Structure formats: structure tokens, C-alpha cells
Amino acid sequence: MKRIAERERIPEDKLKRRVKNGSVVIVRNSERDIEPLAIGEGTRVKVNANIGTSTDTSDIDNELEKARVAVEAGTHTLMDLSIGNNIDRVRREIIKKTEIPLGTVPIYQAFIEKKVDMDPDSILNVIEKHCKDGVDFLTLHCGITRRIVERVSERLIPITSRGGSFIAAWIIKNERENPLYTEFDRILEIVKEYDVVISLGDALRPAGIHDASDWCQFQELLNMGRLTRRAREAGVPIIIEGPGHVPLNQIEMNVKLEKRLCDNAPFYVLGPLVTDIALGYDHISGAIGGALAAMHGADFLCYVTPSEHLGLPTVDDVRVGVIASKIAAHAADIVRLGDTKRDDELSKARKELDWDRIFKLCIDGRVRAEHKDLVGKKACTMCGRYCALKILEDYLKR
Amino acid sequence: MKRIAERERIPEDKLKRRVKNGSVVIVRNSERDIEPLAIGEGTRVKVNANIGTSTDTSDIDNELEKARVAVEAGTHTLMDLSIGNNIDRVRREIIKKTEIPLGTVPIYQAFIEKKVDMDPDSILNVIEKHCKDGVDFLTLHCGITRRIVERVSERLIPITSRGGSFIAAWIIKNERENPLYTEFDRILEIVKEYDVVISLGDALRPAGIHDASDWCQFQELLNMGRLTRRAREAGVPIIIEGPGHVPLNQIEMNVKLEKRLCDNAPFYVLGPLVTDIALGYDHISGAIGGALAAMHGADFLCYVTPSEHLGLPTVDDVRVGVIASKIAAHAADIVRLGDTKRDDELSKARKELDWDRIFKLCIDGRVRAEHKDLVGKKACTMCGRYCALKILEDYLKR
């Protein structure tokens, strides 16, 4: 706890209080030998990168390369969303080859193995297997209920969450309540044994700005708030997942509502994307929404890559996605924590046209490689010999 | 005026009232045969792309190609910031080969031709030449005064504005007041003859978040407010240019201050960039700041390309820069104007997995070319056969 407090630059007693009241969660499976990660109030905004095989693209080595690149680009956590190849093997390989917290979505595997014939026990077995393997946090869509599924057709796009669609399909087919909802207490028992954090998945996150902040979304959030209380009573830390596609002027409200209804549980947002039309550039749309959400209190940003809505990301998409989210997270840290040291040092280096130092301080070390001809130069090709910084320096010196 | 009102979907009388009170400006030189463009209150947020030669890179054809690509990507205006090659020729070629409003910064040419020996008359001559050539709006750094220049050394980076640094150098060398400030009335006379809009340049825009919202910046803004009134009395429309590097939590204040001090003149922001460390990705940092600024009332976004702070943009940088700004502008239009039609249509197409239509509606037509294998398919490689949209559709239908 002391080490985490130092890293986050928070007094240790304050951090402990926040962990106790649930506004900060510490992510690390007790079976795993990695640095624990704090997410939540007063800590630096964290970034997650999703990797994992699909049914169409299922090369494990490629996913491991994505993990490596995501870590290199500065992601704080990874999520393995594999649905293709040998799901157990992919997960175990990622755990073996990385040293940052890993999240999974057990319902994927449970549904893929048994489809709508899955039963509560088979789901719990998958959850337990993931915990045993060392997964640090689990996305569980416990908040979607039959009452909500009955109304999803009112939306422009009913459900875009993969886990949410699996559960909704199961609910419709079996005419029964969501097993992740009915078996919540048994789930709490399992995860508690491994110090695993539950990330309550937002099955009803809007898939387009048309459906943002609607009845389905907030009904699920209301359910999540009640589940959060039950989890805390059982001593299980909770993260709340959030949207999704949200217009700019609804982002602050969404964050404040989550904090209010879920007793300040850390908020983990996917984007949010501020328009639906930015295909190919959704990392930019997501960085806009993420920065705004984090400024207003969101604690954890799930990256969005340029290939969102188009396909499984490539290794380069992963890198760009992480960097876009890191920019959003850092922009928010500047105003949340007054964390301006690196910016100020870089500005100072810019004034001195000290390219070597500029490249050391900037967000992507690879920028140096592409612009190494600048090192030692006293200007860039933008202004050439009419560099504003240089001209002024010359005259101010006289 | 009627055509503009229709295009902007504003009642014609409302538009006329706003043009009269200066909260909307119509950009088009009377010598030019192009569609006039409205910028300001209640109109769609506009995007500008900077092109132009540098002393190091001065191929006219390359700059014309950038102009073409910027227009193709949807920029509303261009600015020619040339400081290399034959400046007159570059400007005239761009005017000849494009059909959208063009802005220039006459002080560049005035300073480059005579350096600190330039005098008020030589500056006015350049301004008049640009007006005669058909330039539609001029950036003029009229608000920077001796009193401010005396204090710029207090900043981490005194001045990053190229035009600002030229004027500051002139002020220091000649120990005289800024000629663009002292000769403001003569400037108004010249531009009025050609229906040219003045964009009051922000010589003191902060070059790093450390200097954001400081004495220098707001002293200049105060000066701009007074100049705006004088210009309006003379019947000359004014745009106000704004920062620069600004932390997330100062953006709303900056916009509101500009609207208050400059009697609701359209606000034209460069970015703002929400962190200094995003070199190589400043289009993302700028899109975050631009979306937030536009949501709060900024009317006109100057693009920032990935090569900002690193060099003159390439053709591809220009394209990406325009698209990033268009995303920010559109995200703001969604909440300013309720402009959700295209988003909703795209969401509907997504629900139907109608890729052909998705590609027609998305922000960059080129995305289709890179993903044309999706057309006709009922899923993408992200989820493969476990597509959330498809699974739910199947079960909801039963």
C-alpha cells in the first residue's frame, strides 16, 4: 500500500481510506506476482487496451505482440477479449508473458462453450477458472435484467455489448433472469477468494448517440448501484463500466450520475465516442470523450482503436489506440492532479530548441526516430529561418 | 444571404441580425467569385487548414496538392502561411486553383521583405496587395503592444506566434508601438473596400499550458475587444483568434471571456492543445481541445496536424489534421445545433450491417477503400460469428 501511495503521490492514510470506502480499488489477483494497480479517486487516470483473438483472426503470437506494444505505449492494464482459438491457452499465455493487471469477460467463454444452453453453474465454473489462472479483474454484466431486455427493441441499436448480447439471447431463449444477476452472491464468494476486482459491465451502453442516456442505460446503472452496495458489504471491490457513444454535453452528467448512484465507485469508460461517423478515426473521437469524462471524474479509460467498428485492431492500431487514450488521460491528470511537470519541462526544452530533450519527454518515444534529423538543429521545417522562438530570443537578448 | 441561411439552416432574418451585430461574419473578398461563408453564432462550426511554403520546403505544387486534399477532406477555409519561394505567386496560385475562402498573414511578407526596417507604409502596401489579389480574411496581430512585449520574458516561452514574434522584434528594435495597432484605422479603410474580414491574431497565444490564461494573453484580448468595437463602428467584420495550449479546465473560461470582451465576435481557436507532450499526435490533442471549445461557443477551428511542433506538414498530415478537426467540429455541432441526422443514419446502417451505406455516411470516404471486403458481409473481424448486433437480432426476431 505504501508503494502504491508513493507512486500515485497520495498520502498513504488517504489512499487506505479511499480503498476502504471503495472510491479506489486495488487491482491484482492474489495468485499473481505483479505490481498492484490503484484505480479511482485522486489517482492518475488509467488506460486499458483490449486484445484477444476473434473467430476470424486467431493467431496467439499476434495477440501477444499486441500486448507487448500496448505495454510499451504505456497501457496500465490489458483485457483479453478472446473468442477464437483456444481461449484458455490465449489467456494463460498473456498472463505468463505480461506484468500488468489483466481483465477478462468470462461470459464470452461460457457462452461460446455452451451457447444458450449454458447454465449458472457453467458460468460460475468459468469465472472460477479465470480467477485461478490469475486474472485480476473480471467484467461481469450483472446489471442487465429481463425487465430491460424486454425494452431493448425501443433503441436504434438494441445492444452492442458482446457480453450483453450473449446474456440477452440467453434470457430470451430461456425466459429466465440473468444468471450473473441471480447468482451475484455466489460470484462474490468466488472472486473474494482471489482478491479479484469485479468490473460491472455495461451491457446497455449506447451503440450510437441516439440511444445515449436512455431508459435502458440508466436502468442498468441503477441496478449496478444496488449491486455495488452488496459487493462492498461482502468486501469485494467494484468498478463500474460506462458508455459508449455519448454526445459532448451528456458526458459530465453521465460521470456525475455514476458517482452518485454507485457511491463513488471508480468509473471505467469505453471512449466515450462523441460522434458515430468517425469510422477509421474512432481513437480521436474516443480521446475527445475520454478526456472530458476523465476531467469530470472518470478514472479508467478503455482505449478505442482506429479500427473500432471495422474489425479486430492490428498491432499498429493497438499502439495508436493506447497513445490516444494516454493523451486523454494525461490531459485530465493535468487538471485533476496539477500534474504539469513533464509538460513544463518539455516547453522549456522547446524554448531552448533542445530536440534531444524534447524527444525524451514526449508521449511516444518513436517520434524521435522519425524526426532524428532535428537533433542539434535550431529550427524545424515549419518556419525554417523564421522560427518565432529563435527570432524573439535574438531580439530579447540585445 | 438567403443561400447562406439555407445552407446553415438559420432563418434569414436571424442570420442578418447576427451579421449586423457582428456575432456572425460573412467571409468573401468582393473581388472573388466563390460561395460566401458564414462563421459565428448558430452556424455550423467551421474548420481551417493552414498550408504554405517554408524557407526549407517551398514547392508550390506540393502546397497546391495540400490545398486539394484539405478541400477533399472537408476544410471550410484555407490559410496560406507561405514564407518561402515567391510568396506572391504561391498566394495567387492558391486563389486561382481553389474555391473556398482564403486567409493570409500579411505581416509575414512585410517582415520577410524588409525585416525590422519595414515601416507602417510597407505593411499597409502588403495588406492592400493581398486584398486586391482576392484574399478573403487577413490575420493581423493588432493587439500586441509595447506594454505587453516588455513583459513577455516572464513567460516560459515568450511568443510562439510567428507574426507575433516579427512584430515584437520590430517593436524592440525600433522602440516604437506596433504599427498594426497604431495604423488600425487606415487598415480598416483598406479592407473595407474589398469586404475583407479581419481576424485579429493572437500574438500572445500560450505556447505551453504553463503560460495559458496569463497576463500577456488576456492583456492582448482586452486590446482586441477595444479594436473590435472600433472595427464594427467602421463597418468591418472581426474574428478573434485564440489559444493555443490550454489545460482542459480553462477552455470554457477562455471562450466565455472572449465572447464577453469582444462582444460575441466569432472565436477562431488554434487547437487548443490540452497537453504539451503529444508531439506527433497533436491533431488528437487539438481535437480534444477544439471539441470542448466549440461546445462552449468557439466557432472556427484551425486544424492542427500530426507534425505540429515537428515540421511543415506533409500532404497526408494535412488530410489527417482536417479530419481530426472535422470530428471535433461535428461533435460540437451535434450539441450546438442538434445535428444528429448523419449519426443516426449511420447507426441505423450499422444495425443493418449495411456496409455500403456505412461507408457513404462516415467522415472519411477513403475508409471504404481500406475495408471494401466488408461490403456484403454480415459481421466484421472484431467479433466474427459472435457479432452482438447479429446475435440479438436473431433472438429478438424469434
Image (cartoon, coloured by chain):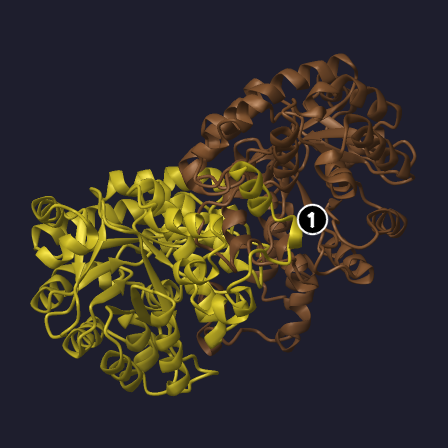
Chain colours: A brown, B yellow
Q: Does residue B252 appear left or right of residue B10 in this picture?
A: right
> For residue A159, what is the image quadrant?
top right
Q: Does residue A166 appear left or right of residue B6 in this picture?
A: right
Quadrant of the image containing the N terminus of chain B = bottom left
Q: Is residue B358 above or below residue A340?
A: below
Q: Is residue A180 above or below residue B190?
A: above
- Viewer-nearest residue: A351 or A101: A101
Q: Which residue is mark 1?
A: A49
Res. B330 visible in picture: yes
Quadrant of the image containing the C terminus of chain B = top right
> For residue A38, what is the image quadrant?
top right
Q: Does residue B263 appear left or right of residue B336 in this picture?
A: left
Q: Is residue B293 above or below residue A3?
A: below
Please name the residue shown 45% across and 64% down the image: B321
Q: How many marks?
A: 1
Q: Residues within 10 Å of mark 1 (few under 14, many from 20)?
A: many
The location of residue B183, given as percent across then percent down, is 17, 63
The location of residue B361, given as percent across then percent down, is 39, 58
- Viewer-nearest residue: A6 or A153: A153
Please name the residue shown 51% across and 29% down the image: A217
Disc 1: which chain?
Answer: A
- Viewer-nearest residue: B167 or A17: A17
Q: Does residue A207 appear left or right of residue B14 in this picture?
A: right
| Residue positioned most to the top | A233
| Residue positioned most to the front | B398
The location of residue A318, given as percent across then percent down, is 67, 57
Looking at the rendered structure, the kind of residue marked 1 is: Ala
> For residue B93, what is the image quadrant?
bottom left
Res. A221 visible in picture: no
Label 1: element kind: strand
The location of residue A93, given as percent across then percent down, is 88, 51
